[in-house]
Amino acid sequence: PGVGKSTLLLQMAGNVAKLSIPPRGIGMGMADDKEQNNNQNLGPVWYISGEENTMQVASRASRLGIYESELLLLCETDVDFIAEMIISSYEEDPPWINDEENEDGDIGRGRLQRRRKPCLVVIDSIQTMVCEAGGSSAAGGITQVRECVALFLRLAKSTGVSIVLVGHVTKTGDVAGPRTVEHMVDCVLYLEGVRGSSGTASNVRMLRAAKNRFGSSEEVGVYEMNGSPTAAGGGGRLVPVSDPSSLFLSMRLDTEDSEGCAVSLMLEGLRPITVEVQALVSISADGGRGSSSSRRTVDGISNSRLLLILAVLQKRCGISFFRRDVFVNVVGGMQLNRNWSSTSQGGSEADLAVAIALVSSLTGIPVRSDTAFVGEVGLLGEIRTVPSIDKRRNEARRMGFSRVVTPPSGGGSGYSNKRRRREGGFIDERNVGGITWIQCSTLLDAINAGLVSNLPKKPARRKSTQTSYVERDALSGLEKDLRRKQTPGSLEDLQLDIIDDDEDLIFE
C-alpha cells in the first residue's frame, strides 16, 4: 500500500490519452486524414476506480498535471455493468441511443452522445470488483477475484481492448487471490518500494516483470518519486531513472579508501547496477567474554547468505568472527535477496563484496575505492562465476572504477596479461578497455586484491611430531623392551656393595 500503483497507472493513462485526438464538434472544421486514422485506430482511455471516488482521482490527476479530455473516469465495482458498457461501445447502434420522443414531445433532446471505443481500460483494483458469477462471496475473495478476472479475460479477447488490472499483494509479496490469476493474464508486473536501513520509505521504485507473453521478462524499470510541488509536471510523480548506478552511488566518497565499504556489480534484469555494501564488525556487548550469542543484522541481503560467508571465512581463510557483532547494509534500500528472473541469483553475486567489507571492518584495512567486486562465494572457499561478466565490467568502467575483481572467466581479451600461481588457486590480471580486470579463483586472493594492503600472514606452524598408530605401537614396544633392560631388577644389577647391619654399628 502506498507504493504508487495508482499514480503510475494514472500517469500512463494520461500519456496514452494524449495520443487520442477528440472528435471535432460543430464549427471546428473538417478533420484531416491523420486525425481520421488516429480516431479509427486509437480511442479514449477509461480509468475505472473501485477504491476512490471521482473527487479523489481528479485531485490526484490535478496534482500530477494531467488534464487530458480523452481520459475518462468511472467509479464502479460491478464488472457486469462495466463489461456491458465496453461491449455497447463497439455496437453500431447502441440501445442507449434513440431518437424517440420524450415526455416533452421533443425529438433527440437529452440523447446520449455516442461513446467511442476505448483503447485502454484500467481497473483499480480487482479486489474491489464483484460479478454475478461470483455468487454471494465478498469482494476480494477467491471466487470473486477468479470470476472477475475470467470475465475481463473474455472481454479483452473478444473486443481486442487492452485491460490493466491492479492487484494487491500478501505479506510475503505474492499476488493476493488464487494462483490461477497469474496464469490467466498475459503479463504480471511487480512494483516494489525499497526501504532504508532505519525502516523509512525510500523514493526509489522498482518495476519488475515476472511474466510477459509479449516480450522479455528481464527488463527492469527504475523510478524515483518526485515530491517537489514545483517540479515539472507536478509533484508526486514517478520519474524514470535512466542511470540507477549514479543514483545509488551519489552519496559515496569515491576519493577515499574506507573501511567496511565495497561496491558490487549487480544485474537487475538486463541492466547492470552498482550498489554499495557496508559492513560493521564490533566486539559483542559482553566485551567478548561470556556465553551470550553474537548479533547478525542484515538489511538488503538474506541472513542465510551472511552466515554462509562467515562460515567460509572462518573455515577456509582462517578469519574468525567469534564474539563479534556483525551488521551488513545495502545502501539505498536495494533488496538483493529475491529471485525475480532467470539471470538473478538471489543476491549471491554480491557475496564477494560482502566478504571483503566484513574483513575490512574486522582488520581495519581499508578497501580500495577504485575497485568494484562481483562473484559468488562457494563452500570450498572458491569464487564461482556469475553471468554477464563483460556487461558488469563495462558498467564499472563507465562509473569510473579503474579495477574490477571477478571470478575466473574464459572470455575476454586484453594485454599485459600477468598470471601468478598461488597455493590452491591463481590470479589473472589484465588490462581490458582501460580497466584492470583481476580474476581470482579463491576468496583469500580476492580479499588481498581488494584491500589496500594484504592480510597479515599467520606464523608458521611447527611440524607435527605425531606418528601414525602403527608406528606408535611399534615404538611403544621397543620402548618397553629398553625399559625392561635398563630397569634394575636386583641390587646386583645396581653393582652396589652390600652392607650388613653390624657394619653400620661400627660407624656409629
Image (spheres, rainbow, N blue to C red):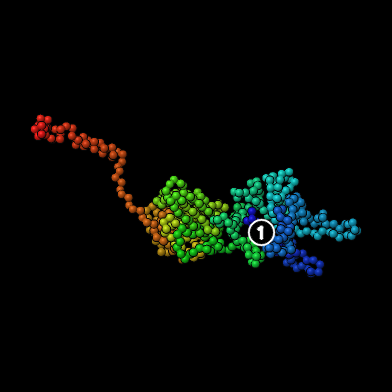
Residue 109 falls in image quadrant: bottom right
Residue 99 visible to an observer of this rendering: yes
The residue shown at (62%, 63%) is 226
Which one is in front, 149 or 231?
A: 231
Q: Is residue 494 above or below residue 66?
A: above
The residue shown at (49%, 50%) is 296
Residue 488 falls in image quadrant: top left
What percent of the width, then of the height, locates residue 378? 45, 50
- The residue that mark 1 highlights is 7
Rendered-image quadrant of the C terminus: top left
Residue 397 visible to an observer of this rendering: no
The residue shown at (82%, 58%) is 112
Kindly state the secondary structure of the residue where label 1 is placed.
helix
> Is residue 94 left or right of 426 when viewed as pictured?
right
What percent of the width, then of the height, locates residue 234? 66, 65
What percent of the width, then of the height, locates residue 63? 68, 63
Q: Residues within 10 Å of mark 1 (few under 14, many from 20)?
A: some
For badge 1, the amino acid type reads: Thr
